[in-house]
Image (spheres, rainbow, N blue to C red):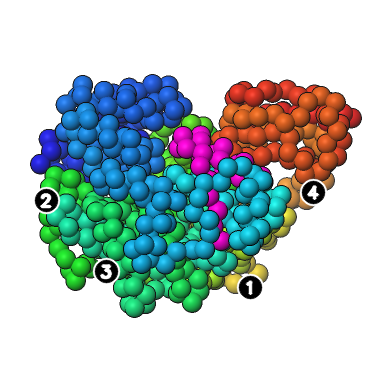
Amino acid sequence: MFKRILIANRGEIACRIIKTCKRMGIATVAVYSEADDGALHVQMADEAVLLGPPPPGQSYLLIEKIAQAIRDTGAEAVHPGFGFLSENSAFVAAVEAAGAVFIGPPVDAVAAMGDKITSKKIAEKAGVNIIPGVMAEIEDAEEAVKIAGEIGYPVMVKAAAGGGGKGMRVVWNDGEARDGFRAARSEAETSFGDGRIFLEKFIENPRHIEIQLLGDTHGNIVYLNERECSIQRRHQKVVEEAPSPLMDEATRKAMGEQAVALARAVNYCSAGTVEFVSDQKKNFYFLEMNTRLQVEHPVTECITGLDLVEQMILVAAGQKLAFEQEDVARDGWAMEARIYAEDPVRGFLPSIGRLTRYRVPEEKDGVRIDSGVEEGSEVTMFYDPMIAKLVVHGEDRASAVAAMRRALDGFEVRGVRHNIDFLSAIMREERFEEGALTTAFVEETWPDGFSGAECGTREETVLTGVALLAHLTVLARDRGITGTLDGVAMLPDTWVVRFAGRKVLAHARLCDDGLDMTLGDRAVPVRGGWSPGLTRFDGTVEHISALVQVDREGTNWALSHAGVSTDVTVLSQRADVLLERMPEKPAADTAGMVLSPMPGMMVDVLVAVGDAVEVGQSLAIVDAMKMENILRAERSGTIGKVHVAKGDSVAVDQLLIEFEA
């Protein structure tokens, strides 16, 4: 067995690998960039090696730097994690040349399956169902338009290398094909150093289902059931689960056997995933093979009881699999939600900053947190914006969904925008509860963009009760009122609770174990402890369990529950009347300004002073966290000022371009 393993990655996957290595008694070496100095994976490792400046191209993607770290530290093996160099055959060769073992498949398998064009040809030869398309490199945008027309729209424009949603666009006409080709190639070159692009038919209303494989160096390969990854945004997975609600035993077996056949065709070993796209009738087609550990591997671990990182290490050390296909378990249901630093109500734009508060649900009763950050960590513009993976395991899908809802309610993140409300909203959608999924679920559910979870009657009742409990508790403390009946009677009992655009009239009194509240003629007891300084209410409202995040912001209460985050103001009836008379502050006029919607770097500025532009015309391209974003004109006019240039770093809401008045 290995004595020292180098982890060629960062963030939560590096921390995950280090934890397994510690349990196995293996020393670890972390690599890091200047941006990750003091990061959690660096703290956890036994040794750490600085690679270079923050951009991945100057640190985590430098093969020779990592090879030198292998030699300098005496690491016997290297685990690549996912992303970065994990599917780079040149890196596999460099690891072996440095005298270490690559914890993953052999270099030929990485090369064959890491190239989507080559992999589809091998899959077809191995008898695997493939999607119609042109499995050859596309030279330019005009050729892409020509081929797309021959295939028939809609068409998927895809990078031949890499994964994770980078370098992928669904296009529906010639104009989108041109733009999609250029954007996909640019993203692929930035993320993977390989700008080759190909086209394939886009399956409408598809489901994304993948098979987890595990093979050893002795010719044994098994499939570890499937994962459903259909909840996506911009081809980036958001929620994953195992098993799939679509699957039956016959389809599972057929899909698993095709995945194994493909693996055998390239003499595959270690952990890997064969991804399929399926229509609603369970017709499935090969999508790609990822020759690495997947982000969503924890859901497979939950239902099989296996540690995939440990299995990869054992395979790399030459050991045989300790089980056969018939031994693979499928226990209960697991679900994973990816917590990202992004702002869903602003088009999911990435958010950067320091985590001023980071508190996670307790890891018990089937809850697991995979994270690479801690309170005080900084989310930068240089890397993927994932903060953590929240994983739950239940006896069936309904219990897994219920556990995920509660865990999301208790997941506290401050200092950056995040997508927790969005995830909670997904969990409460009827279609999701029914398992009626497609990869277009997000776009179909929120066609005009996500503007926040709907505050229904139940959510409003809970937030009203907790706001009143918090407000009256603080008021009693500030006035020195004790919890006696006479003391509590000194407080008013009629209050106006103001939400955005709505007011609730309530009667409320503090009591020994919470609050007695009346809404109209309905008694609504609020039971559970809360005191100033606590950030969570954990109790019951109207006899139903409720977990609510509570922050005081001036005279307002910032509350979060069931995906609803809102500012609530509690006022006496007199104060409410006076507040209605206050004039509203007029909004600033930004109609002639183009502001950066995100922090990032200017990839290009496409206009100059004096240019006449039309609505929808591309003005600039901003790169944020490895994704390119085209800024388009929202009005026609003439460019008056350009405040930035190609290569500039920009902050969110920074003024980039002004139109003439």
- Asked whether the viewer can see residue 400, the reply is no
Classify mark 2: helix, strand or loop.
loop
Residue 512's spot in the image, x, y percent? Answer: 44, 58
391 left or right of 478? left
The image quadrant that residue 504 belongs to is bottom right
Q: Amino acid at mark 1?
A: Asp
Residue 443's spot in the image, x, y percent? Answer: 61, 59
Q: CA distance from mark 1 to mark 2?
A: 69 Å
Q: Which residue is mark 3?
A: 331
Q: Amino acid at mark 4?
A: Glu
| Residue closer to the observer: 474 or 249 | 249
Q: Which residue is mark 4?
A: 580
Disc number placed over residue 319 in the picture, else none: 2
Q: Which residue is mark 1?
A: 521
Question: How many residues crowd mark 1 within 10 Å: few (<14), some (14–19), many (20+)?
Answer: few
Q: CA distance from mark 2 to mark 4?
A: 74 Å
Question: Which span of residues is magenta-colored?
Answer: 179-201
Among the two numbered marks 1 and 2 on one chain, the one whose residue lies closer to the N terminus: 2
The reply to whether dot 4 and dot 1 touch (C-beta < 8 Å) is no
Residue 123's spot in the image, x, y percent? Answer: 37, 60
**Above or below for 603 versus 332:** above
Q: CA distance from mark 3 to mark 2?
A: 25 Å
